[in-house]
Image (cartoon, grey):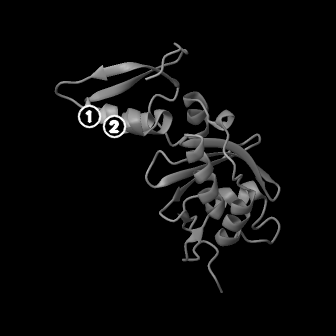
Amino acid sequence: MNNPLKTGDMMEMTSLRVLHQSMTAINTDIQQFQINVGSASFDCLFSVRENPFVLALTSRGANPKFFKFLVKKGYQIQPYFDEFYYDLVEVLKSGANTGIKLYPKLFLEQLNNSIPTVAAAKYTPSPKQILELRPDITEQRDRPYFDTWIHWTEKKPTKENLQKTLSLLGNDAYEHSISNRASSKWSAEDLGKSW
């Protein structure tokens, strides 16, 4: 019998390939959208700012759960959900309660069929929206707005600060941070600044 936790073969996410092409055409590197898979609804982010790319899903509802998928070369996602299998089962209302098991490959097929393939500028989220949908970005979660750069002579930006810079501002800001030994400084209030 197949173990539902691990199926081995990578799953090509063809819709992400087409969405990425559409994103390139409008010069954006991140898109936010909503999808439904079965009876569950998710707020999603697809980011090509990071390597590998990231597809982040946050379930909608009273008790939201976060799921992060690494999208590897060829738009491949590994159908191995060991870290969050049971949380996803709970969100999808399957598993022990219904007698239906969650099969990662089947879930990824359903996900692939639900993802939009046309990007739009209006679906490019703000840094605040990204931070709300990415609880894996841990640095100063109460400060979603860019303020300024802090330049260092002896120290350098922390790994967490670099991750937040990349995820919220993009690769150009990340490269600026590294090459100038500058940490991004964030504010709890919108100061109307861009990096």
The amino acid sitting under disc 2 is Glu
Name the residue carrying label 2. Answer: 175
| Residue 23 seen anywhere in this rendered image of the structure | yes
Q: Quadrant of the N terminus?
A: bottom right
Labelled disc at residue 27: none
- For label 1, the crowd category at 10 Å Cα-Cα, with few meaning under 14, some 14 to 19 and many 20 or more, is few
Residues under numbered marks 2 and 1 in contact, where contact means CB atoms less than 8 Å apart = yes
Query: Which residue is at 61% across, 32% downward?
Result: 129
**Residue positioned 70% across, 60% down in the render:** 111
Q: Quadrant of residue 37?
A: bottom right
82 shown above or below 175: below
Q: Which residue is mark 1?
A: 179
Residue 105 or residue 72, whichever sits in front = 72
Q: Is residue 102 left or right of residue 180?
A: right
Residue 7 spot, x, y in % from top left: 59, 77
Furthest-bottom residue in view?
1
> Which quarter of the figure is the C terminus placed in?
top left
Residue sitting nearer the eye, 177 or 86: 177
Q: Position of residue 80 (x, y in %)?
A: 56, 68
Q: Residue at x 51, y 65 (%)?
A: 74
Q: Amino acid at mark 1?
A: Ser
Residue 79 visible in this rendered orientation of the protein: no
Q: What is the crowding at mark 2: few (fewer than 14 residues within 10 Å), some, or many (at least 20)?
A: some
Across and down, in percent, residue 165 comes to 42, 34
